[in-house]
Image (tube, grey):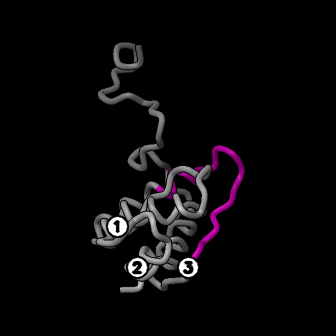
Amino acid sequence: MYHGFFGFKEDPFNLSPDPAFLYRSGQHEEALANLIYGVQSRKGFIVLTGEVGTGKTTMLECLRDYLEQAGVEFAFVFNSRIDADQFFEMIAYDLDLRCDRTSKTEVLFALNQ
């Protein structure tokens, strides 16, 4: 429908945000710069807040693109309805850690190495 009427070459709406279509306002640039700084400085957990529809998820997609281009390894935990053991298992899987992924202690030792 959108392709024929508007002459689009790509679908304008997808389930996950596409950073390529983001209008980067000054606030978006500052948020992304803070996220990148937090990762580079190993600040630990970083909180990104905002109203619905302000681009938080898209900022995380931009951060993910940046990390991939920079060769920085990262884990993407996309499900918040997991317990602590599942959290560590997902991180071990994403980082391809060579350990018993079902053991929190083994995952922590592998992360420290």
| Secondary structure state at the residue bearing disc 3 | loop
Label pair 1/3, CB-CB below 8 angstroms = no
Q: Is residue 109 above or below residue 87?
A: below
Judging by the rendered image, the residue that carries numbered circle 1 is: 95
In the rendered image, the vertical position of residue 34 relative to residue 69, given as above or below:
below
- 81 in the magenta segment: no
Task: Please say whether residue 63 is visible from this viewpoint.
Answer: no
Circle number at residue 111: 2
Q: Comparing marks 2 and 3, which lies closer to the viewer? A: 2
Q: Quadrant of the C terminus?
A: bottom left
Is 56 magenta? The answer is yes
Most foreground residue, 5 or 34: 34
Q: Amino acid at mark 1?
A: Leu
Q: Amino acid at mark 2?
A: Leu
Quadrant in which residue 52 is drawn:
top right
Point out residue 105 in the picture as x, y percentages from the top left corner.
Answer: 48, 77
Q: Which comes before the other along the chain, label 2 or label 3?
A: 3
Q: What span is colored magenta in the figure?
A: 44-60
Q: Residue at x 51, y 66 (%)?
A: 32
C-alpha separation, residue under disc 1 versus residue under disc 3: 17 Å
Query: Do the CB atoms of the residues marked 2 and 1 lie less than 8 Å apart?
Result: yes
Foreground tag (1 vs 3): 1
The secondary structure type at the circle numbered 1 is: loop
Q: Residues within 10 Å of mark 3 (few under 14, many from 20)?
A: few
